[in-house]
Image (tube, rainbow, N blue to C red):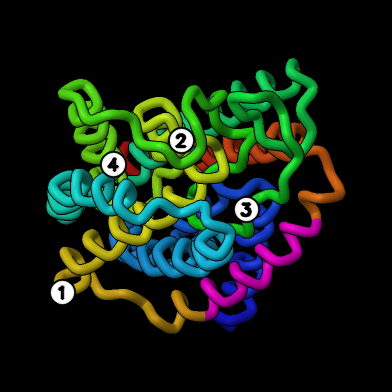
Amino acid sequence: MTWLIVLPLGVGVGLALGALGGGGSILAVPALVYAVGLSPKQATTTSLVIVGLSALAAMVGHWRAGNVRPWAGLWFGVAGVAGSLVGSRLNRSVDPQVLLLAFSGVMFLAAWRMWISARRAGNLRVAPSVVTASGPSVVDPPLGGADAPAAVLAPEPVGREGRVRPLSARLVLGVVVAGTVVGFMTGFFGVGGGFIIVPALVLVLGFDMPVAVGTSLLVISLNSAVALSARVATTGVDWSVAVPFTVAGLVGALFGGTLSRRASAVTLARWFAVFLVAVAAYTMARSLAAIT
C-alpha cells in the first residue's frame, strides 16, 4: 500500500524537478507527512536522502557538460557545515507542528522567488533559456536535481562562466553567510536550498547560470550528507519510503525534462509557484490547527 502512495508522489516531485530544474523536492516533506504518514522529524530526515541522491544523480550530466566547479562547490559546502549541524540539532528540539509551520514559510518564500523570477524572465521574453552576460541563449534545462532552480528561477548573471572572482574579504563573507544559511535550512528543514544557492553563486562568485546550477548540486549533496550524518542516529530514515520515492523521482525527472522542452519555462514556473502556495497554505493551516 505504501508503494502505491510513494511512487506517484515521487514521480510528481520528479516531474517538477525535471521540468523546472528545481524546486520540486521542497514538496517532499509535506508529501511524506500528509500522504505517507511519517512524523515531521522523520520526514525531514528521510527527505535528506531523497534530496541528496537526486542531486548526485542530476550532477552527473552537469559534470559531463563541464558545468560543475568542484573547488567552489566544496568551498561553499564547507561554509555550510556549521549551519547544517546547528539546524540538525535544532530540528530535534523543536515541536513537530512548529517545524511544519516554519516549513510552510519556506515554501511561501520559494514560491515568491519563483514567481518574481518567472515574471522577470517573461518581461525579457525569454523562453526555456539561460540569460548570460552576453545575452539570452537557448540551452537544455538541467535534468532534475534537488532544489537547484532552472535558468528561469535565478537572476541575471554578472560574471563570466565558471570564473571565480578574485579573493576578497567581501567575497569570503558572502560565501560564508550564504553557505551557512543554506546549510541551516538543509539541516533544519531537510531541503536543498537551491533557490538560495544558485543566486548566491551567480551574484557572489560571478558564475554563469549553467555553472551555478551544476555547482549547486554538489553543494546540496554535501549539505544533505552532513545533515543526514548528524541526524540519522537519533531520527531514523524510513528506507522503505526513501528508496522507491527517490527512484520514482528520477523517473519523473526524465519525463519532466521532456516536458520542459515542449512548454514555456515561464508558464511552468508560474503554475508551480501557485501550486506551491496552495501546499504551503494547507501545511500552515494543518499545523496551526494542531497547535491550537
**Does 105 appear above or below 249?**
above
Task: Give the amino acid type for the residue marked by disc 2 in the picture.
Answer: Phe
| Bounds of the magenta segment | 244-258
**Does 122 appear above or below 100?**
above
First-in-chain label (3 vs 4): 4
Which image quadrant for residue 210? top right
Q: Nearer the viewer, mark 1 or mark 2?
A: 2
- Residue 148 is left or right of residue 253, and the answer is left
Q: Nearer the viewer, mark 3 or mark 4?
A: 3
Q: Quadrant of the N terminus?
A: bottom right
Q: Tell which residue pokes out farthest to the top in this image.
A: 123
Task: Give the amino acid type for the residue marked by disc 4 in the picture.
Answer: Val
- Residue sitting at x 81%, y 50%: 261
Mark 3 → mark 4, Cα distance in angstroms: 34 Å
Q: Residues within 10 Å of mark 3 (few under 14, many from 20)?
A: many
Q: Quadrant of the C terminus?
A: top left
Q: Quick one: SS at disc 1?
A: loop
Residue identified by numbered label 1 = 233
**Residue 242, image x and y in percent?**
44, 75
Task: Give the amino acid type for the residue marked by disc 3 in the picture.
Answer: Pro
Q: Is residue 289 among the parts visible in the rendering? A: no
Q: Quick one: SS at disc 4?
A: helix
- Residue sitting at x 40%, y 44%: 193
- Residue sitting at x 46%, y 29%: 109
Q: Is residue 81 among the parts visible in the rendering? A: yes
Asked if residue 252 lies in the magenta stretch, the reply is yes
Mark 4 → mark 2, Cα distance in angstroms: 36 Å
